[in-house]
Amino acid sequence: MKIWDPLHECMPREDLEQLQLERLQATLNRVYKNVVHYRKLFNEISFVPEDFQSLGDLKKLPFTSPTDLQENYPYGMFAVPLREVVRLHSAPGRSIKPIVLGYTKNDIRTWANLVARFMVAAGVERDDLVQIAFLYGLQTGAFGIHYGAEAIGASVIPMSTGNTEKQVTIMQDYRSTVLVCTPSYALRIADFMEEHNLNPHGLALRLGLFGGEPWTEERRKEIEERLGIVATDNYGVSEIIGPGIAGECVYKSGLHLFEDAFYPEIIDPHSGEVLPPGHVGELVITTLVKEAIPLIRYRTGDLTRLDYSPCSCGRTLVRMEKPRGRTDDMIIVKGVNVFPSQIEQIIFHLTGEQPLFQILVDHRSSLDQVEIKIGVTEKIFALELLEQTRLLESLRRRIRSVIGINTTIRLVEPATLTNVESKVKHIWSGPVD
């Protein structure tokens, strides 16, 4: 079995922990010196980087939240001058303004090597043709996979998203061997091929690397059977680096988390206390080698647990379980992070009111369907029918423009929403493990 970086992926734990300590000390010095936000936080608790003497000292430091990144928009969290930043991406924030992400040349090089690790672990080789059906744009997914595939020496087909007919044609004609997309889009491709009497087993595809949204073992089995491939999972957080934090090997027994680049903790999402290994809690990550935007104890909002037992593949890195859910109100639709607060701001912007609303996400089809129910207010009720139709269309267009998802929007009686405990409701085709 091939391993891209055996020095770091198979490092004895004692050596790994020493490396983590050294890199943490360097990171803390960098943020204290260069990031006003962290210097202020550290001064408030009378902490200086020289006080950091062991990995256990990390729990004494405050967390970083998505709100911190949002409030320091656009460049307040950068630890290097903008002239050293060679790439800018963004991630959705809780408000309409996005979170700005920066990468130095070294960050891009690190990113490529981390992605190459999980791609090789999944079975990608130099002779593969990798078809990337993630969106090429301000989001991080497509570019991270692109860099990793090129680092391996594989051929990249940068298809981007959509146009399923063309995606399938390219697979057939170019003889693509690896498909990279969301798991829901993989099933959409399978649906298309069945609808057009195309045999997926006639393709050259042998691997699928899927991420960007939660998926179950049942969905993995369905993808593998319908497309005739081996499907593996990978994990990324845009604010941290994008894809490249963790990924499955061919044994599919958890996602190897690259601890030489990221220090993971599992905390109680309510108390913030660090939990022992094996307990389910919120994943917190501290970056160890990121130059442009180093993050200290970043709360991902993802619920998972860590397994430090050896893996049959020979890697010594800790493995994280597939995320079980979220601690906040964020939902993921077709690989896009969506916050109800974003929807709320758009509704207020176009109506001048804050009516009751609910987001319904239907996971029963191969592509998630999103419906938004808005309680009718007196102001909306007073509109002519044509004006109501125009309002709903404006809302749909604005949500598509700002957030990047298509929705169906309906006006309903407010009474039907008054007992709703959450603004988000999920409809699943089966149990979620």
Image: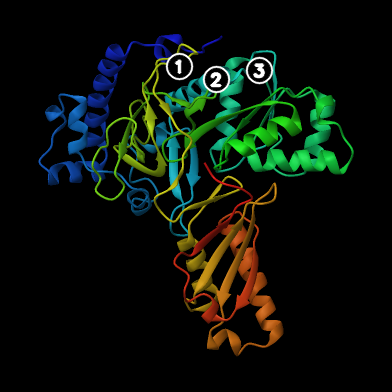
- State the mark number for residue 311: 1
Q: Is residue 368 left or right of residue 424?
A: right
- Gap in Å between the C-alphas at discs 3 and 1? 26 Å
Task: Tell me, yes or no, whether the two marked residues, 1 and 2, touch with CB atoms within 8 Å.
Answer: yes
> Residue 186: x, y in percent?
70, 38
- Residue denoted by label 3: 154
Disc number placed over residue 251 in the picture, else none: 2
Q: Which circle's residue, 3 or 2, is located before the other in the chain?
A: 3
Locate residue 322, reporting x and y percent: 48, 35
Tag 2's secondary structure?
loop
**Nearest to the observer: residue 144 or residue 4:** 4
- The Cα–Cα distance between marks 1 and 2, rounded to whole angstroms, is 8 Å
Q: Is residue 132 visible?
A: no
Point out which mark residue 331 bears. Answer: none
Question: In the image, what residue type sits under mark 1?
Answer: Cys
Task: Give the crowd class for mark 1: few <14, some 14-19, many >=20 residues within 10 Å.
Answer: some
